[in-house]
Amino acid sequence: MRRSVFTEDHEAFRATVRAFIAEEVVPHYADWERQGHVPRELYRKLGALGVLGINVPEEYGGAGVTDFTYQAVLREECGRAGVGFGAESVHTCLVLPYLLEFGSEEQKKRWLPGFLSGEIMTAIAMTEPGTGSDLAGITTRARLSGDGSHYVLDGAKTFITGGAQADLVLVVCRTAPYDPADRRGGLSILCVDTSSEGFAVGRKLDKIGLRAQDTAELSFTGVRVPAENLLGTQGAAFTYLTHNLVVERLGAAINAYANAAGAIGFASAYVREREVFGKPVAAFQNTKFVLAECATEVAAAQAFVDRALLEHAAGELTAADAAKAKLFCTEVAGRVIDKCLQLHGGYGYMLEYPIARLYADTRVNRIYAGTSEVMKTIIAKDLGL
């Protein structure tokens, strides 16, 4: 089907990214998975390529693109190759919107130049060992000093993507006592320099997928955070956290769809080459029917994503529609990649084949940025149920 969401500029960017992935990522990706993170040099190369500055305003050295279409090109090309850029997507799609929307002019001038060059990598720390989706239950605390010059931060976070390599971490913490009558109040975001005394990276978590993307536990013991590192207004963090959910869920939908499309590409190539009972696997009716089903589902997901991208660019993508896009595309990806792995037979279970990586990497899409069950709750509420 003809797509109208991308222009010639997008396609030129796609060609550049595709060549970069082939030369700089694919040959090394297995090694990065084994070590559990990408090299810092990759982020600097992405910065030089302009990837990290796509959505950074021009006055800070970025391209000043305000929509999500170029990010979609990146995810599609990563899915096509069955690879990723480590924690780049958290840096550019999750953290950046907070800095742009709620950061002061001084903070933007201080951090954004390094942000877009890859010299300053960022992460956001919300989840705690005892609190998952219930952000109102956060217990990490920050106490403002008597003279108001700094906060003293204590607590722990877990499942922090990019946390092991980050230079700056946006930490959601409680700056006012917990009030059962207002569970969402009293939360703030502090931007923590990871070279600060008392900051520590704990266990690097061993995941079933996304193995080249570092995920870690973080701890804060009496960390002094300058008052000028408060992001936005004290006590307003819960409102801030809901501000970017539409983009997070759109990003998850795009990533899932892109991985499903990539899986079809890998499966189609494999079944043409692999022979069983004297003929290619592609010659069997079951193979043709399975891939036909997968292609149809991915085409529907692509249409959904394209429509969502257009609505987001127009400022019209609602929370409910973003939830629908995430729910549909992540569930489609789960079904499609599973079927494509099955067509590989035993080899599909071997990590040397990209389909195995896609199978493991994509599973978390139905969990982060709100589980499928949370998406259904949002959609049902929109229906008035």
Image (cartoon, grey):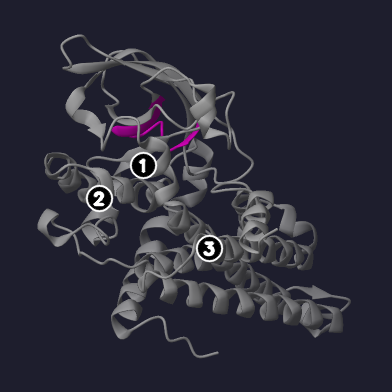
Give amino acid for label 1: Pro
The label shown at residue 322 is: 3
Is residue 210 a member of the stretch shown in magenta? no
Q: Please tell me whether residue 325 is drawn above or below residue 217 in the rendered image.
A: below
Pointer 1 or 2: first along the chain: 1
> Looking at the rendered structure, which numbered label has been put on residue 100?
2
The secondary structure type at the circle numbered 3 is: helix
**Magenta span covers which residues?**
158-173
- Depicted 19 relative to depicted 159: above or below: below
Which image quadrant for residue 330? bottom right
Q: Main secondary structure of the magenta part?
A: strand
Q: Are marks 3 and 1 in contact (CB under 8 Å)?
A: no
Residue 39's tag is 1
Q: Residue at x 57, y 34 (%)?
A: 134
Closer to viewer: mark 3 or mark 1 = 3
Where residue 339 sits in the image (x, y, percent)? 76, 66
